[in-house]
Image: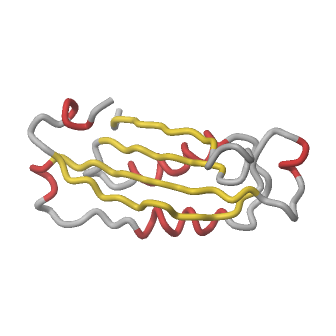
Amino acid sequence: MDAVSIFPEGYVCSRVMGMVVEVAVGIHPWERHPQRPNKLAIDVEMFVPTAMASQGIVDYDPVRNLVRGWAGRGHVEFLETLAEELLAQCFSEPRVAAARVRVTKLQIFAEAEGAGIEVFRRRP
């Protein structure tokens, strides 16, 4: 879904791109070893309609702090769990009308740069 079609009046996008964190995540037996967490790349985009953007910047420190807090946490089976946590953090800022998050395992397949998920959601 294209943000321009959602916000024909325009938008400001606050981004945090390429954060890297190690998290024990996955459903395969080799992903459950606590001493070998998966290296994840995290990208977050928070869309604010232009009319609301004049109220100041969207602080992306809470997103960064959430991701940094994942290091050393207990095992998580699904990347979707992490994505939902990120989306909840994004929408805790009342001006964010839509958000896109990407969670990518960077070292999961030898023949690929990464494998992961992307979720785009509008505020309900």
Left or right placement of residue 73 versus residue 106 in this view:
right
Q: Position of residue 120 (x, y in %)?
A: 41, 36
* Front residue of 108 and 64: 108
Which of the 4 quarters of the picture holds residue 98? top left
Work out whether residue 105 or residue 73 is closer to the camera in this orientation and state it. 105
* In this rendering, position of residue 15 left or right of residue 83: left
Residue 15's spot in the image, x, y percent?
A: 35, 58
Count the numbered circles shown: 0
* Residue in the image at 46% along x and 46% along y: 101
Q: Viewed as shown, does residue 16 lie left or right of 77?
A: left
Left or right position of 55 against 83: left
In which quadrant is the N terminus drawn? top left
Give me the residue at 81% from left, 39% from top: 27
Image location of residue 117, percent across then percent down: 56, 39
Q: Which quadrant: the C terminus?
A: top left
Compared with residue 44, is residue 124 higher up or lower down, i.e. above or below? above
Instruction: Describe the colour scheme in one phrase.
Output: secondary structure
**Which residue is rendered at x = 75% and y = 49% of the image?**
25
The residue at the point 49 percent across, 67 percent down is: 64
Q: Position of residue 91 (x, y in %)?
A: 38, 48
